[in-house]
Image (cartoon, grey):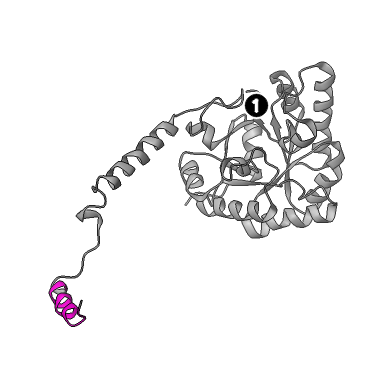
């Protein structure tokens, strides 16, 4: 049985210069397959609101929903380093509420790290959750939970002024107690500088190749979605058309009377059909 991976293993990987492979997924089956493929970290992101529930943003994800699916991912991949994503309004309404909700992920879902989308306003939250004994992944750069205020998401750190703000924010997150940083959608050059300055693992989601690790959502990796994904995503298969073809073949078999056949059906025990037919005579009709 493999040893369970923890934040200590990610720090060791960073210190040795070994890249960390991470995936974001939302269900036990995909988590099982990702773990078999060698993924070291799985993030259960609030993008599940979009990928699983069909919403147009991450905002409708609730704590109850996120805890439940995070627990499912843990059951599918018990040995990976598991990151739980704090959804919108789970840490915005006060430090006490933030620590309580973070604790739910640890106690009820077996999470190893708690991811928090953070600006400087949430440095006290980062510190409080860390002080409570939980490892925090500070999510900076593009922050999807801010879509209601910004209207659209765009790359961060693309000017010197924006870059210095993001670099300073990364420094502050680590000082506040963050055990890891998720850097989303920023200029590659800035991702390199942040990674060089940090003493904790920096995981890139569109932060460039110079970070300590990379993460993409499983549907993008598998090519399950139509249309292009974000600039930083890459598909490693085109399973969407294959899924449509497979389900289409099933539909054709059902409509043609070819499924299920005898081999895919249960059967009455030997000698019992005759007995049943005799019993049916007594029922009439």
Q: Badge 1, how many Cα within 10 Å: few under 14, some, many 20+?
A: many
**Is 6 left, or right, of 268 in this rendering?**
right
Residue at the image point whose x is 18% and y is 80% from the top: 279
Q: How many marks?
A: 1
- Predominant SS along the magenta part: helix
Looking at the rendering, in which quadrant would you find the C terminus? bottom left
Residue at 83% x, 22% y: name it. Answer: 164
Q: Residue 177, percent across and down?
A: 80, 43
Is 151 covered by the magenta stretch?
Answer: no
Residue 105 to residue 58: above or below? below
In this view, the residue farthest toward the front is 285
Q: Position of residue 189 (x, y in %)?
A: 72, 18
Relative to 200, 250 lies left or right: left
Image x and y of residue 43, in percent:
61, 42
Q: Secondary structure at mark 1?
A: loop
Residue 265 falls left or right of residue 205: left
Q: Quadrant of residue 58?
A: top right
Q: Is residue 277 magenta?
A: yes
Q: Is residue 132 visible?
A: no
Residue located 80% across and 27% down the image: 166
Q: Residue at x 47, y 52 (%)?
A: 1
Choose between 4 and 71: the one closer to the eye.
Answer: 71
Residue at image mark 1: 206
Looking at the picture, tell me which residue is in the foreground, 111 or 201: 111
Residue positioned most to the bottom? 282
The boundaries of the magenta stretch are 273-284
- Residue 200: percent from the left, percent from the top? 72, 36
Q: Is residue 42 left or right of residue 262?
A: right
The answer to whether residue 19 of the structure is visible from this angle is: yes
């Amino acid at each position: 049985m493999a040893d369970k991976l923890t934040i200590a293993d990610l720090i060791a990987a960073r210190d040795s210069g070994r890249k960390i492979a991470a995936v974001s997924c939302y269900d036990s089956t995909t988590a099982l397959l990702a773990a078999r493929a060698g993924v070291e970290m799985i993030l259960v992101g609030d993008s599940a609101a979009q990928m699983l529930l069909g919403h147009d943003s991450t905002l409708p994800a609730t704590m109850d929903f996120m805890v439940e699916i995070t627990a499912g991912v843990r059951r599918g991949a018990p040995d990976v380093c598991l990151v739980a994503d704090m959804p919108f309004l789970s840490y915005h309404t006060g430090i006490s509420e933030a620590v309580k909700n973070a604790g739910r992920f640890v106690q009820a879902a077996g999470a190893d790290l708690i991811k928090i989308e953070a600006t400087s306003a949430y440095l006290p939250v980062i510190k409080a959750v860390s002080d409570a004994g939980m490892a925090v992944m500070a999510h900076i750069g593009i922050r999807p939970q801010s879509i209601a205020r910004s209207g659209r998401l765009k790359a961060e750190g693309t000017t010197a002024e924006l870059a210095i703000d993001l670099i300073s924010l990364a420094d502050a997150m680590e000082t506040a107690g963050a055990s890891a940083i998720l850097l989303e959608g920023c200029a590659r050059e800035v991702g390199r500088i942040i990674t060089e300055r940090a003493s904790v693992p920096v995981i890139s989601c569109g932060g460039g190749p110079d970070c300590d690790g990379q993460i993409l959502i499983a549907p993008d990796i598998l090519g399950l979605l139509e249309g292009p994904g974000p600039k930083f995503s890459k598909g490693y298969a085109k399973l969407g058309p294959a899924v449509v073809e497979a389900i289409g073949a099933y539909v054709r078999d059902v409509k043609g009377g070819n499924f299920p056949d005898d081999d895919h059906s249960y059967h009455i025990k030997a000698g019992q059909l005759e007995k049943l037919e005799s019993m049916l005579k007594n029922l009439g009709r």
